[in-house]
Image (cartoon, grey):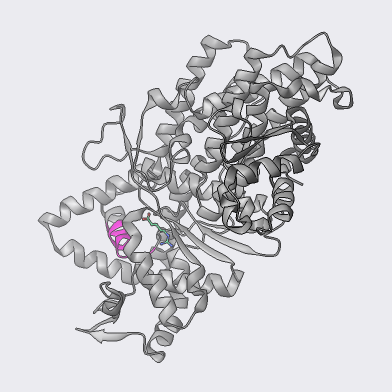
Amino acid sequence: MDIKNRIAEKAAAFTGVPESDVLGFFETPPSPDKGDIALPCFKFARAMRKAPPVIAQELAKGFEGFEGIVRAEPLSGYLNFFLDRGDEAKKTVLRVLEEGERFGSSDDGAGRNVCIDFSSINICKPFGIHHVTTTVLGHSLSRIFRHLGFTPVRINHLGDWGTQFGKMLVAYKKWGDRRTIENAGSPTRELVALYVKFHQEAEKDPSLDDEARAAFRSIELHDPENWELYQWFKELTLREAERVYKLMGVEFDSYNGEAFYEDKMPAVIRELADKGVTTVDNGATIVDLSAYDMPPCMILKSNGGTIYPTRDITAAIYRKNTYDFYKNLYVVAYQQNLHFRQVFKTLELMGYDWAKDCVHVNFGMISMADQTFSTRKGNAIYLEDVLNKAIEKTKAIMMEKSPDLENMDEVARQVGVGAVVWGPLYSSRIKDFTFSWEKALNFEGETAPYAQYTHARCCSVLRKADGYDAEKADWSCLDNESCANLIKAMNTLPASIGSAAEKYEPYLISRNVIDICSAFNKFYFENRIMDEDEGVRCARLALTDAARIAIKTGLYLVGIEAPERM
Ligand code: ARG
């Protein structure tokens, strides 16, 4: 049992205050020389009808000879506990070594599905840097939930339906060339260029818009030729997106996008009407949400066409029926706050009590600090370019630092990708974020390469030591400040993982990983790991091994790989 629980149990028995309350009282002393855990005794004053200093004195006696504590010291109304650091270190290290990469995991979520709608790119549109946050947050959340026993359902809700595909079709038929597009390094860019051209031409010749509407209609009717072309556009975009996902190690369980719901919408539209949720306003079918201070949620345009919210309402019902989700998450930028509030409210009005399990995991905007990719108007910054550039830059740095590294390309990929994705993973998701090369590729600052480098350092220490025997460890040598800090940082990881899942905030794990890394580096510089004394050496190596596992696990949970050599 955790030392805090044991202290709380004892203090509860002594004071008559419930143990669960006592657990909430604990504080951290202002400085380490005042102890490791503080219990403010004024919290017991009312129950015990005594002055806090008196309570502290009496309680202190009760903790004499208490296992895991070297002493309990009363100080101005507080009782300060000095933990037996060697013992604490032993317990933590052995736990981490035993759990390995399952450290901090649980089976709390067993038998429960969590749908995670993330990345959700648009067909025939750039897979831009602005899609990095949803991609890495969703990827990380899926790993966090799996670590806690849940079954994540990773959904790429493709933007693959709408009148824009009619425009695409017209543009392709007028100006496109199949071979050129197929053979282009980036077919998406060819398609985007055609799309841009369509808009330029349509300004001069509005009849193009009519053609586009008719073309989309033909897609809706599955006209064989146009349907085939539309599928081909999708295939081209996805093939290219796959390259990006592969670089990042991101995977999906479903690519059911907007088009998938085309034949499922009529039933939902009927259900909305039958339940009296929708009304007709100027020919359009809407859900009046004025009672909830929201503009109406559009279901059918006046021309009878369905739109984005119609598909999301249908998709949510489909997901409930298919996956019986425990939670249904949407990792989408805060620009869509209103959209999701409208969708969730509509589901609630339909009588679905599971509407409360739908969560919009929103996040802030991303921008580029460096001008490397100039944001000329309409000139998107492709995520693939940013990743490749980071990999290239990383490789150049490594060529200098460790020219003999074996699988240089693979390591450069792992570190380069880590550098790019770190930013959105290191702050509360709602904060806007500015990407800068200098910050990202810093091996010293609070970055992914720094954490990866620390992990590789642990591996290198262990490699050189060529094994150790934890049974022979003299744990009492792990009682200094730097060891205690490292132990503490590792000990908080399981709780950080839990909070990250509860708040949908992977950064709580990234920060904890950085704490472990800085604590390890301090320990590394202040303690001679390869001590002559075998007991000391084994204890320090075991601690290093535990740090390696904790860092690797934490990084894995935020979707970052940890190479063994750098
Ligand atoms: N494709 C949309 C976009 O890029 C995001 C879709 C998010 N998911 C959803 N179910 N609406 O803006």
Tell me which residue sits at (47%, 63%) in the image.
Answer: 359
Q: Is residue 167 magenta?
A: yes
Residue 396 position, x and y percent, is 48, 16
- Image quadrant of residue 185? top left
Q: Horizontally, is 233 left or right of 98 in the view?
A: left
Magenta highlight: main SS: helix
Residue 77 position, x and y percent, is 57, 41
Q: Horizontally, is 534 left or right of 6 in the view?
A: right
State whether residue 432 appears in this view.
yes
Nearest the viewer among 183 and 355 is 355
Q: Is residue 516 magenta?
A: no
Nearest the viewer among 107 and 525 is 525
Tell me which residue sits at (48%, 68%) in the image.
Answer: 260
Of the four image quadrants, the one with ligand 1 is bottom left
Q: What stretch is highlighted in magenta?
A: 161-170
- Which residue is at the far right? 471
Quadrant into which the C terminus falls: top right
Residue 483 position, x and y percent, is 68, 24
Tell me which residue sits at (42%, 46%) in the image.
Answer: 429
Q: Is 133 located above or below residue 440 in the figure?
A: below
